[in-house]
Amino acid sequence: MKYFVPAALLISSLAAVPAIAQTTHATTPPAVSTRGDKNTTAAPVAGANSFTMAQAQKRIEEHGYTQVSVLQKDDKSVWRGVAAKNGRAMNVAVDYQGNVTAN
């Protein structure tokens, strides 16, 4: 009987551990999908861009553009340049989420 009370306390405290673990919340937002040509937000989105110039150019080319040139990062950290698609030159942009937009 003297082991019953400590054992019961141990079992009840272990039962509470999973409940505590389930109540924690992630503090980072979910990752943004950049698959395909669909933008996930109103692009281009201003933000700290970790793409290099070469990576931004590759991202633009993966979206069917050729002759990518004049790439420069603007004051909102969006890569902007000129590229051709279907024989037509246009302005293009790559934001920190990887969204490629043209106008």
Image (cartoon, rainbow, N blue to C red):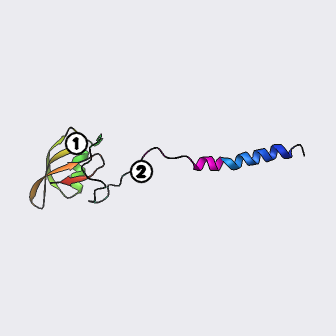
64 or 30: nearer the viewer: 30
Q: Is residue 40 rendered magenta in the image?
A: no
Q: Element at badge 1?
A: helix
83 or 47: nearer the viewer: 47
**How many discs mark residues in the rendered view?**
2
Secondary structure mostly seen in the magenta stretch: loop
Residue type at tag 1: Met
Q: Give, as a single range, the part of the protein colored magenta.
A: 17-31
On the image, numbered disc 1 is attached to which residue?
53
The answer to whether 17 appears left or right of 87 in the picture is: right
Residue extending farthest to the top is: 75
- Residue 27 x/y as whole percent: 46, 44
Residue lying at 26% horizontally and 41% vertically, measured from the top left: 52
Q: Gap between marks 2 and 1, in whole Å?
A: 26 Å
Q: Element at badge 2?
A: loop
- Residue 11 x/y as whole percent: 75, 48
On the image, numbered disc 2 is attached to which residue?
30
Residue type at tag 2: Pro
